[in-house]
Each structure stands twice: as C-alpha cells, then as structure tokens.
Image: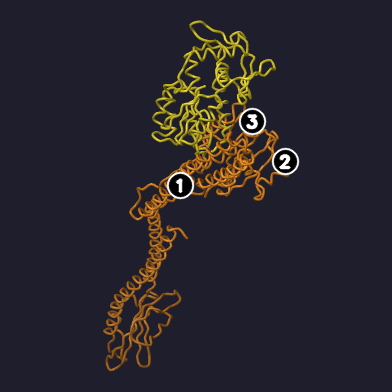
Chain colours: A yellow, B orange
Amino acid sequence: MRLLLVEDHVPLADELMAGLNRQGYAVDWLADGRDAVHQGSTEPYDLIILDLGLPGLPGLEVLARWRAEGLPTPVLILTARDSWAERIEGLKAGADDYLTKPFHPEELHLRVQALLRRSHGQVNQPTLKAAGLQLDEGRQCVTRDGAEIQLTAAEFRLLRYFMLHPEQILSKSHLAEHLYDGETERDSNVLEVHVNHLRRKLGRSVIETRRGQGYLFGGQTR
Amino acid sequence: MRSIQRRLSLGLISVMVIVGLVLAQTSLWLFEMGLQRYLEAGLRNDSENLLVALVRGPQGLQLDERHLAPAYQRPFSGHYFRIDFADSHWRSRSLWDQELPRLEHPGLDSNLQLGPEGQQLLVLRSDYRRLGQSISISVAQDYTPVRESFRRMQQVGLGLGLAGLLLILLLQRITVRRALRPLEKAREQIAQLQQGQRSQLDDQVPVELEPLVAQINHLLAHTEDSLKRSRNALGNLGHALKTPLAVLLSLASSAQLDAHPQLRKTLKAQLEQVQQRLNRELNRARLAGDALPGALFDCDAELPGLLSTLNMIHGEHLTLSARAPAGLQLPWDREDLLELLGNLLDNACKWADAEVRLSVLETVEGFELSVEDDGPGIPEDRRKQVFSRGTRLDEQTDGHGLGLGIVRDIVEAWGGVLQLQESEWGGLNVLIELPKRR
C-alpha cells in the first residue's frame, strides 16, 4: 500500500512516516500544497493523508482540485480545526474521513486500515479476510484454517496488497508501484522472491502466475 | 415611551382646540360688538325721532302721533320706547301691559328680558333737555332674532370647527405615518435582524436616520468581522498547539519508551489533559453566543451534510435520520448550531446500535431539538450527575464520555434547557428547548 502524506509540520510528518512505515505502508511525504496537487494526481497512491493547514495552497483547495480532476483515491483529512462546520466543509470537498489533531498514532493507523478496506469494498471488520486467509494487520500475521503463520514485513505488505485486490491480475510493475515509495529503487526480482516466500508459507495455489500478465491472488477459490 | 404618532396627535389636538375656541369666541364677540354699534346708531336715530315728535300740546308736552313709527303702535312688535319725565313716564303702545324698566345710566344695555314672549331687548337710554324739562328717552329693540342667529352661527361654527379638526387630524395622521414610514421600516428590519432574516439594515433612509442606520450597520459588520477574525485566530492557535501535541502523543507511544512504562503512562495522561482542556476552551471561545446571527441555520440545507459527515465518521451501519418541518430555519449562528448538533449526534452515534434520530420542532415558545439513540441509555439516577459540576461524566475522557460539555455551554449561552430522557427505543434522548429570540 502506497500512501501520500501531505503535512507541513516536519516533526509530526517524521513521526507519522515512522509509524506508518512500521505498519507496512510505503509513504511519500510532501509539505507544499501545490506539489501535492500535482503529485497526488499523477502517482498511483492507494490513500492520501492530507493536512488542511498547508503552505502554498490550502488543503481543502488541494482536495477540491483532485476531486475536480476525478481522482478517486480515498483521502483522510488531518487537521487541528475540529469544528463541525469545518468537518462538513471537508466532506463536501470530497474527503473520506476526518481525523483531528492531536490524535493517538494507533487511531490514525486504524482509520487508514478501515479506509483502505472500505475503498476496496470490504466491510468494516477487525481482520482482513480473503481466499480463506485472515490477516491481522496489527500483529502482521496471517491465519489459515486456525493456524497462525508469521510473516516478514515485506511479505506482510505484499500479502495485504493481494488480499485487498483478490481475483485481480496484478502486474509486477503495478505491484512495485504500490508497494514502494517514490524513492526506493524498484527491483522486480525482489518481488518474485517475496511471492515465492508467500507461496511456500501459504501454499502454491494461493498466488497464480499468469505468464506475461502478472500474478493472480485467490483465483482458485472460485 | 409613547409612540411619536400619539404624541403628535395629542399635541396637535390640544393646540387646535385651544386656538380654535379662543379665535371663534373672540371673533363672535367682536362681531356682536360691531352689530350692537350698528343697532345703537339705529336706536339713537329712533330716540332722536321721538324727541322730535315731542311737541308742546295743549296739556303740556305730547307726542305727535304722526311722527311715531307704526311699530310702536303694534303690541309686542319688537320696537318699544319709554319716555321719562321728572314725575311721570310714557310707554309705547307696543309694550301693551309690560313695563320697560328705566336704565340706571344712559347708554346701551343688551340684557333686558321682556315677558311674556321672552324677548330680549337692546335698550338705549338717552337723556335730553327739551322745553325746559329733562327728558330721558329709552328706546328698545327686540334683540332675540339677532341672538338666535348668533347661536346658529355659533353652532354652525362649532360643527365646522369640529369637522375641520377631524380632517386636520386625519391629514396629520396620514402625513405623520408617511413621514415615519422609514422609522417603521427600520423597526421591521431590526426585528428581521434579530430573527436572523437579514444581516444588514437597508441604507436607503432619510437623512435624519442615516447616522443611526450607518452606525448599526457598522456595528453589525464589526461584530461579524471580529467573530470571524477571532474564530480564525482561534483556529490558528489550535493548529499551532495541536500539531506539536500530536507529535508529543506520537512520541509518547514510540518504542523508545518501551523500557519506561511509568514515564509513558504519565506523559500520556498529562498530554491527554492538555488536549482536553485545549479542546474544551477553544470550542468554548469559538461560540458566537448571543450575538446577532449573520446567517440563519437552514435545516434543509445543513442537516443532510451533517448527517452524511456523521455517517462517514461512524460507518454505514448506523441509520441516521432527521425530522424537521420543511423550510424550517433556526435563528442562531450556523457554526454554533452545527457544533451543538454535531456533538450531540456524534455522542449518540458512539452509543447507538443502529439508529439515531434528530427531531427539530417549532413550538409556541421556541424550538425543541431532540437527539434519540437506541443505545444502552443512562439510568435515571445517574442522569443528574452528567450535569452536576462536581462529577462531569462528559469530561472524563474526550471521545469516551458524553461529549456534552460544549453542548451545555451553547445551550446555556442561548438561555435554553437541556434534559436527558429515555428514548423511544430505550436509549438516551437528549432534549433541548430553546426559547425564541426576541
């Protein structure tokens, strides 16, 4: 999952980046509203965390421009302005959720998880379920038929992405775009290695390879 | 204070009545004086004719009948005379059996009554000396017809005066109403202002009202502007304080503190206190309170947005509904009302299982807002505690308590009443009664 964080307060951004990285998200960070308008609509983000008090361009204006361009990415607004009038304005501008400062980091993580699941058509439930697997995002482990299987951070990221996109053919470049932030060098071989690790832990049939097209997760359950 | 219209009417009536009466009476009196002078000249003429008719006859003085006017011969004709000598007096035949009293002094008198027909006489007594005798001739004329015509004139004049007064009053009323129309308009506009139906007074007013209207408009703009500025400043302050607070909260949960659980606990507790206090005070400071509302709260326009925001925050499993009469507008500041309803509904959503309902009613005294949920509710004996100052359930933890602190502040500022009841579904019903603004 690749996230865009738009926040001008550097210490807070650092904290959030660290926390989100620990949760297995690839995070790009921007501090200026004008950059955010451009990058948010060109890079394939899965979710955007947007602060409203931004230099360059106000957050609400940034959001309104994205929505005007037809950007469907879910946006979580982060703001110190917590009056209901402003919350409603945020929603009208096209936000999907609203978190007021200050907040507990866990609160943000839960909101991000919930928003991602919601945007992928998954109902709100404590764990992510797909293809007979249950993924515990808090503990970063997967359960199959009652047996708990430990995952490495990279495997967890990959499996979460697959589980949010079951029965969809995902190309290697697509996966790379969504699993790594803009500054990490993307090596498709590394991806292959992680896919193989997942197959070894969860069974070969869980991830099919479609030659020339990419990977298909959960295809055998149909 | 009595109305200007009434004062003007009263003043005008008293002035008109006094001036009218004095003027009418004086002119009548002057006219009567003039008439009497004219009649006096006639009477003097008559008495001189009588004097001429006195001739020396065989038995002393006698009247020459040929020189007497026929009116003196016909009984009660209206013209009479009496001639006094030193020891006797003559009367005209027209007096018949009546006595015309002799005036004490020579001159004119108009207050003589003569029966039986009750004629009022105007009498002139003149003294002469003729043929060696002093003679006093009194000549009288019936004054009644003149008096009657005077009375008629008086009545007609009074009637005309009254009619004129009424006409003038009517015209004055119309004029005053026309002249005061701008004031009346300003009064209506101020009423609309108080009900929040407008934000400024019309400045197309007469010169006399211009400073007043301009000043009111200036104050309104100033109030609105300073409210906006203070809200903005508070927003900035909140932003400036809350962002570092978020960093601190995040740091307090970081792995570096895993070795010091006690320190982490204290840090978190203190930070939470700061956060709660900050939220409460900032929210309270944001309230417009009882200032004039810049815009009405339009239920049809605002409620759907509020409900969908809440649905977004609390998830689609909750059914949120609002019942309000179509086109209902609440006369309070939009942001304050959103804050009030937002907090109430947010609280209800936290506790509800599946349903939350907002109802807005307009009553005779004001408005009734109620927010019902189907959650666990609050037992009756604990409901009072929610509001008692000592134990504020609502302030124990932000987000987990009742969140009613700000709600109470708003309701208090508006002079309303807040009650907790059991809802139709067994959950909590928060009922707020707000009095109409006057």
Looking at the picture, tell me which residue is in the foreground, B318 or B166. Answer: B318
The image position of residue A214, as x and y in percent, is 51, 9
First in sequence: mark 3 vs mark 1:
1
Furthest toward the front, the residue is B259
Name the residue beneath numbered marker 2.
B379
- Determine whether, in the image, residue B65 is placed left or right of residue A73: left
The image position of residue B109, as x and y in percent, is 37, 81
The answer to whether B235 is drawn above or below residue A172 in the figure is below
Q: Are marks 2 and 3 on the same chain?
A: yes
User: Do labels 3 and 1 touch, CB within 8 Å?
Assistant: no
Res B230 label:
1
Furthest toward the bottom, the residue is B132
User: Do labels 2 and 1 touch, CB within 8 Å?
Assistant: no
Q: Quadrant of residue B32?
A: bottom left
> What residue is drawn where x is 50% and y is 20%?
A179
| Disc 2/disc 1 C-alpha distance (Å) | 40 Å
Residue under mark 1: which chain is it in?
B
| Disc 2/disc 3 C-alpha distance (Å) | 19 Å
Looking at the picture, tell me which residue is in the foreground, B281 or B382. Answer: B281
Which numbered disc, 3 or 1, marks the residue closer to the eye?
Answer: 1
Tell me the SS state at disc 2.
loop
Amino acid at the residue labelled 3: Glu
Name the residue beneath numbered marker 3.
B355
